[in-house]
């Protein structure tokens, strides 16, 4: 992952020294639009959560700056699935797997640099912040078979981002809706239409609710660690 980060950063920094390239096929300035779909591999960092696969889809508007040697600005709107999973023990001493599917609407804002290797093939990289709001999802408990087991699973399966506060059921109100962070993308485009991208997003916001954190400290005397979203994505796009 560190190599990916360094590669993306290096490519974006090329925008500052673009004159080093001979732009035989310089990108055309102006606006263009892209539709996206793909898959995520996500994780809740800093508390032993495992990875979970998800999906994403969205749209982008790119603006290639005139006379800027391949530098562009991009903004978009995505629907994206994040989250993770972990093993827990219920009060009845059953080992369970909790899967956290957190669905967000996300707005990425980035600056990028594109270099056209040939007339029909370009490569690019971009970096910038994102802002997200949780709009749905579910915390699902999986244990095993049997009627009694099903009742326990139902008790610990609930909708994500519940707004009501009840100190008796804090486990049902784990995550807040708002998230933000920074994202990187590297990609390639063929024939000015077909795109393939790899990317990473690092969440900077602690997504645990303050009520959960404060109640946990009151009961145990220990502070919960901060938890952040992490997302690796593989995306296909079509530029219009």
Image (cartoon, helix red, strand yellow):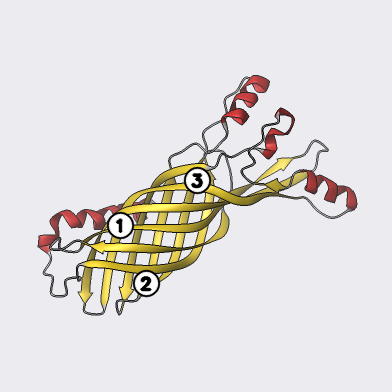
Outermost residue, right side: 147
Q: Position of residue 84 (x, y in %)?
A: 59, 49
Indicate whether 51 appears above or below 239: above
- What's the residue at 79%, 43% (across, down)? 155
The residue singled out by tag 2 in the image is: 195
Q: Is residue 7 left or right of residue 236?
A: left
Which type of secondary structure does the marked residue at label 1 adopt?
strand
Estimate the x, y position of residue 174 in percent, counting from the top left: 62, 38
**Which of the two discs, 1 and 3, labels the residue nearer the N terminus?**
1
Can residue 101 be seen in the rendering of this structure?
Answer: no
SS at mark 3 in the image: strand
Q: Circle 3: is it few (<14), some (14-19), or many (20+) Cα within 10 Å?
A: many
Label 2, label 1: how far apart the Cα atoms are: 14 Å
What is the spatial separation of the Cα atoms under label 3 and label 2, in whole angstroms? 25 Å
Crowd around label 2: few <14 · some 14–19 · many ≥20 (10 Å) = many
Q: Which residue is mark 3?
A: 229
Residue at 57% x, 29% y: name it.
Answer: 210
């Amino acid at each position: 992952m560190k190599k990916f980060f360094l590669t993306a950063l290096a490519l974006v920094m090329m925008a500052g020294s673009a004159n080093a390239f001979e732009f035989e096929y310089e990108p055309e300035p102006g606006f263009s639009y892209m539709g996206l779909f793909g898959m995520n591999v996500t994780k809740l960092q800093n508390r032993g959560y495992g990875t979970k696969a998800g999906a994403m889809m969205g749209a982008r508007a790119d603006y290639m700056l005139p006379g800027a040697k391949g530098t562009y600005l991009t903004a978009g709107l995505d629907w994206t699935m994040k989250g993770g999973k972990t093993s827990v023990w219920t009060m009845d001493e059953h080992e369970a797997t909790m899967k956290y599917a957190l669905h967000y609407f996300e707005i990425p804002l980035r600056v990028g640099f594109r270099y056209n290797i040939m007339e029909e093939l370009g490569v690019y990289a971009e970096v910038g912040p994102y802002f997200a709001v949780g709009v749905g999802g579910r915390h699902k408990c999986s244990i095993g078979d049997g009627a009694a087991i099903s009742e326990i699973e139902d008790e610990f399966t609930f909708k994500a981002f519940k707004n009501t506060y009840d100190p008796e059921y804090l486990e049902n109100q784990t995550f807040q809706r708002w998230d933000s962070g920074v994202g990187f993308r590297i990609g390639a485009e063929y024939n000015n239409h077909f795109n393939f991208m790899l990317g990473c997003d690092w969440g900077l916001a602690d997504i645990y609710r303050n009520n959960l954190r404060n109640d946990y400290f009151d009961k145990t005397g220990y502070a919960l660690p901060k938890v952040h979203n992490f997302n690796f994505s593989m995306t296909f796009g079509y530029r219009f």
